[in-house]
Amino acid sequence: MFKCFKNDVLDQKVYAPVNGTYRFLESLNDGMFSEKMLGDGVVIEPTDGHLIAPIDGQITVVFETGHAYGIQGENGIELLIHIGIDTVNMNGLGFQPLVKVGQKVKIGDSLAEIDLNAIQSAGYQDSVIIICTNGKSIKYLLQEESLVKVKEAICVLE
């Protein structure tokens, strides 16, 4: 993990938790995320269903339905990884969590397996949304519509 000091603020890179197409948060068709009510972030339209840890830290939340995960970074940054829009309504169908609350993870560790076909067949959007929930702003590292691979740096939280 790359860390640097800039104006006495610790910055942290966040890495792609899935392979796919990189988008800005504002591109989503959902007011809660696109209007940044939960915090700033990015979106990846996944090409596969293997979800990995985008930062080193500890799992703070695993929703019963398997559609969302919280991670607190070693330097206090808090991320929410949310799979899909309204996928909570699937009641866990298509989501297989591979971590538990309290578990320590490193970048690249498996978090979940996601059945993208099940999400799409149920009529839901399968976007993977990465949100910083404790007020950090995002510095984008890629152009919108860029193709990303897991463990590729996608943004810096400032």
Image: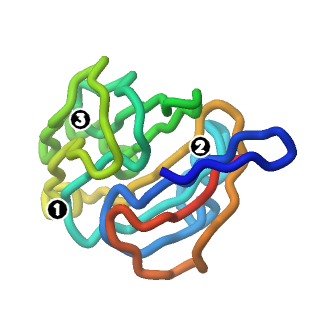
How far, Cα to Cα, is label 1 from label 2?
23 Å
Q: Secondary structure at mark 1?
A: helix
Kind of residue at disc 1: Ser
Crowd class of label 3 (few under 14; some 14 to 19; many from 20; radius 10 Å)? many
Crowd class of label 2 (few under 14; some 14 to 19; many from 20; radius 10 Å)? few
Query: Which marked residue is nearer to the observer: mark 3 or mark 1?
Result: 3
Give the mark nearer the N terminus: 2 vs 3: 2
Horizontal side of residue 98 vs 84, given as left or right: left
Kind of residue at disc 2: Met
Query: Which marked residue is nearer to the observer: mark 1 or mark 2?
Result: 2
Q: Secondary structure at mark 3?
A: loop
Q: Secondary structure at mark 2?
A: helix
| Circles 2 and 3 in contact, beta carbons < 8 Å | no
Tell me which corner region of the image, top left, top right, bottom left or bottom right, holds residue 16: bottom left
Which residue is disc 2 drawn over? 32
Give the mark nearer the N terminus: 3 vs 1: 3
Which residue is disc 1 drawn over? 121
Which residue is disc 3 drawn over? 66
Give the mark nearer the N terminus: 1 vs 2: 2
Crowd class of label 1 (few under 14; some 14 to 19; many from 20; radius 10 Å)? few
How far, Cα to Cα, is label 2 from label 3?
19 Å
Closer to the camera in the image, 86 or 71:
71
Horizontal side of residue 56 vs 120, given as left or right: right
Residue at the spot 28% in from the left edge and 52% down from the top edge? 108
Residue at the spot 59% in from the left edge and 66% down from the top edge? 24
Kind of residue at disc 3: Gly
Residue at the spot 52% in from the left edge and 64% down from the top edge? 154
